[in-house]
Amino acid sequence: MAIGFRPTDDDERIIESFKREGESTSDVIRRGLRSLERLAWEEEARADMARLALEDLSDEPDAWEYDQDGNVRVVGTEIVVPRRKRAEQ
C-alpha cells in the first residue's frame, strides 16, 4: 500500500529538523508515527493509573495460600508450586 503525502512548507521544516544523518523523509515520518503510537499508549496507561489509584487490593481475598509443607497453592485450582529448597550452608 502506498500513501501519498504532500507536505506543506511547515511540514518540510519539521521533517528536516528531525531528520537524522542518513535518514530519508519516510524514515522520519515512520519514527513520528511510532512516537504518536507510544504517546497514545502512555495516555491510556495514565488514564488506567488514575482510574485504579484508589483501588485497595488489601480488601480482596488472596489468590494463593501456603499449604502445610510450605508450598504455594493457587486458591480454587489444583496448581501447587513447590517451595524453594534452601541452599545448604
Image (cartoon, rainbow, N blue to C red):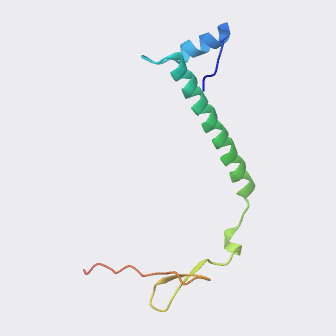
Q: Residue at image x 51%, y 22%? A: 27
Q: Looking at the image, which residue is at 60% across and 29% down?
A: 33
The residue most toward the left is: 89
The quarter holding residue 82 reads bottom left
Left or right of residue 83, residue 13 in this image: right
Question: Horizontal and vertical percent for residue 8?
Answer: 68, 10
Of the 4 image quadrants, the one containing the N terminus is top right
Residue 20 vertical placement versus 89 (above, below): above
Q: Residue furthest bottom?
A: 68
Q: Quadrant of residue 29?
A: top right
- Residue 8 placement, left or right of 78: right
Near-viewer residue (45 or 12): 12
Q: Position of residue 65 (x, y in %)?
A: 56, 83
Whole-percent x, y for residue 26 in the image: 54, 20
Q: Position of residue 49 (x, y in %)?
A: 68, 52
The one of 76 and 48 positioned closer to us in this rendering: 76
Circle count: 0
Q: Nearer the viewer, residue 12 or 67?
A: 12
Extreme residue toward the top, this view: 9
Q: Is residue 50 above or below residue 79?
A: above
Give the quarter of the figure containing the C terminus.
bottom left
The structure residue drawn at horizontal position 55% and vertical position 12%, both measured from the top left corner, is 16
Query: Going 62% across and 78% down the picture, which residue do you hit?
Result: 62
Quarter of the view holding residue 10: top right
